[in-house]
Amino acid sequence: MDEMLVYTDTRPRAKGAGHAFGFEGNLGVPVVVSAMVSVLFLTMLFGGGSRLPLAARFVAGLAPLVLTTGYIVLLRSRRPPRYDIDLLRSLVNGPAFQPARVQPVHPYLHPHHPHR
């Protein structure tokens, strides 16, 4: 009787995140949103009578797309989870897994403690 049962795993072990625009998972969404923002900026800069030079208009208009895509490609795509946050913490706090440069001294171990 068990031979006729079909086994279906309801919790697949390999969850496919999918790919969109060459990025894994949902990383393509910020790129698409920043592209729409860049189109909006370019439309405003070229249609609003801006006095900026032509090259400056393109640079200002494409800045959201370039910055977002650069961030995704350099710090998020094909990287371990939380790589960008860990890198920022390492840059701000210094290398991890090392003792602090100045170790605090316990008040009772201080040589000039008045209660000794």
Image: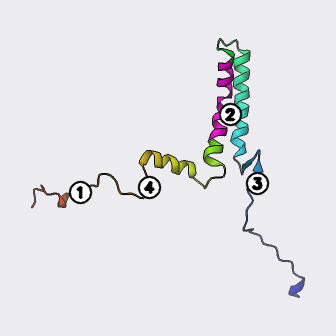
Q: State the image coordinates of residue 115 (x, y, percent, origin top left).
A: 10, 59
- Give whichever of discs 3 and 2 has the lower sequence position: 3
Quarter of image, res 40: top right
Measure the C-alpha gap from mark 3 to mark 1: 52 Å
Could you tell me how many numbered marks the image carries?
4
Q: In the rendered image, which residue does mark 4 sit on?
A: 96
Q: Is residue 47 above or below residue 74?
A: above
The outermost residue toward the bottom is: 1
Q: State the image coordinates of residue 84 (x, y, percent, origin top left).
A: 56, 48
SS class, disc 4:
loop
Measure the C-alpha gap from mark 3 to mark 2: 22 Å
Q: Is residue 56 above or below residue 79?
A: above
Q: Is residue 97 above or below residue 32?
A: below
* 80 or 11, nearer to the observer: 80
Residue range (magenta): 55-70
Q: In the rendered image, which residue does mark 3 sit on?
A: 18
Q: Which tag is nearer the camera, tag 2 or tag 4?
A: 4
Question: Which label number is shown at residue 65?
Answer: 2
What residue appears at the point 29 percent right and 55 percent down from the top-left corner? 103
Question: Amino acid under label 3?
Answer: Gly
- Give whichever of discs 2 and 4 has the lower sequence position: 2
- Give whichever of discs 1 and 4 has the lower sequence position: 4
Q: Is residue 56 above or below residue 67?
A: above
Measure the C-alpha gap from mark 2 to mark 4: 33 Å
Question: Amino acid under label 1?
Answer: Val
What residue appears at the point 64 percent right and 29 percent down from the top-left corner? 63
Q: In the rendered image, which residue does mark 1 sit on?
A: 105
